[in-house]
Image (spheres, rainbow, N blue to C red):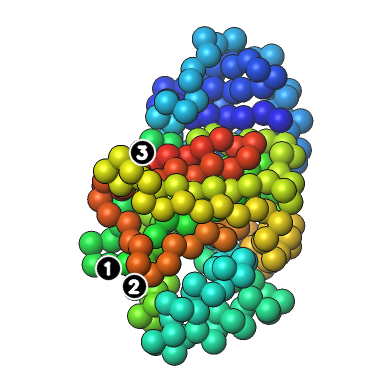
């Protein structure tokens, strides 16, 4: 596997315990390659051996070029239950039950590159929301031909109060500045198995306020299935990112606050950390 980290002035390519540095790298070229891993390996001789940087403590930009970020919903049973609970008062709970069992998944637009934050960058909660949660999600990198070739960590920050008021408010609950984070890097290669663990921790005033974990085996739908539906009758000339849903949902007594530190770890992908503005 090869991991790509995006810094403000250059890119770090980590492979086989070494780090390489280049200013001449394009995520768009990677996402438009028919075989992204082979393309990336062919570029390695052009990169310079770098002084290693500590991944966890380095502020990385989101590993994104021109790609749109999309998301899949209700792919875990826990997500189905939580979405039904939040929408029950508005009478929308039946829709989430139906989509969990339906052939067609729920897919929605999440973010543009400009609205996407990286590792150690601030994320936001809406000022007109009263109930907000992080949603830790395994995120697929899909090339322009619709093939999954890599993975990163995603945080689909969401307003449950707005979405629960009316399911038609989903875009407002999901799409706003600072509502999406990706990183710390993009891992190219097969590193995800059904046993891969996803962990979420939220720290408030230095203390653990919430924690939870799940595994990739709990995702109801296959990655290729989700990618196929996303690309069906659609086009992504620069490829796309697809968040695959969350299986960790805090209960109704928890809401994010300004100053909270959100840490999402996925085996093989590292840890994505963001603080709420």
Residue at mark 3: 121
Instruction: State whether residue 66 is above or below residue 49.
Output: below
- Give the left or right position of residue 117, taking residue 206 as reference: right
Direction bottom: furthest residue: 91
Residue ranking furthest to the left: 127
Marks 2/1 in contact by CB < 8 Å: the verdict is yes
Q: Residue 13's x, y, as percent?
A: 59, 23
The residues tagged by marks 3 and 2 sit, at their Cα atoms, a distance apart of 24 Å
- Name the spot of residue 246 as percent of width and height, x first: 55, 60
Mark 1 / mark 3, whichever is N-terminal: 3
- Between 65 and 171, the one lying in front of the other is 171
The spot of residue 93 in percent (x, y) is: 50, 84
Q: Is residue 260 above or below residue 235?
A: above
Q: Earlier in the sequence, mark 2 or mark 1?
A: 1
Which labelled disc corresponds to residue 161?
Answer: 2
Pointer 3: residues within 10 angstroms few (<14), some, or many (20+)? some
Mark 1 to mark 3 CA distance (whole Å): 23 Å
Please name the residue shown 63% across and 47% down the image.
197
Q: Observer-nearest residue: 70 or 34?
A: 70
**Residue drawn at 71 percent across, 76 percent down:** 103
Can residue 107 be seen? no
């Amino acid at each position: 596997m090869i991991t790509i980290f995006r810094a403000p002035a250059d890119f770090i390519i980590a492979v086989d315990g070494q780090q390489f540095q280049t200013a001449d790298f394009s995520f768009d070229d990677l996402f438009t390659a028919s075989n992204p891993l082979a393309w990336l390996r062919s570029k390695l001789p052009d990169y310079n051996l770098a002084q290693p940087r500590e991944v966890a403590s380095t502020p990385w930009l989101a590993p994104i070029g021109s790609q749109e970020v999309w998301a899949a919903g209700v792919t875990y049973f826990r997500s189905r239950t939580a979405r039904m609970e939040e929408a029950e008062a508005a009478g929308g709970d039946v829709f989430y039950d139906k989509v969990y069992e339906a052939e067609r998944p729920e897919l929605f637009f999440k973010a543009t590159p400009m609205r996407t934050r990286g590792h150690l960058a601030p994320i936001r909660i809406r000022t007109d929301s009263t109930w907000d949660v992080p949603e830790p999600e395994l995120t697929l990198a899909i090339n322009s031909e619709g093939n999954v070739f890599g993975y990163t960590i995603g945080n689909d920050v969401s307003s449950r109060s707005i979405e629960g008021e009316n399911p038609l408010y989903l875009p407002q609950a999901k799409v706003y500045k600072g509502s999406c984070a990706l990183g710390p890097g993009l891992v190219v290669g097969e590193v995800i198995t059904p046993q891969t663990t996803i962990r979420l921790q939220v720290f408030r005033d230095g203390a653990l306020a919430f924690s939870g974990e799940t595994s990739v085996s709990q995702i109801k739908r296959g990655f290729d299935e989700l990618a196929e539906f996303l690309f069906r009758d659609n086009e992504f000339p620069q490829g796309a990112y697809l968040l695959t849903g969350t299986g960790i949902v805090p209960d109704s007594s928890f809401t994010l606050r300004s100053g909270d530190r959100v840490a999402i770890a996925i085996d093989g992908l590292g840890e994505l950390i963001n603080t709420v503005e």
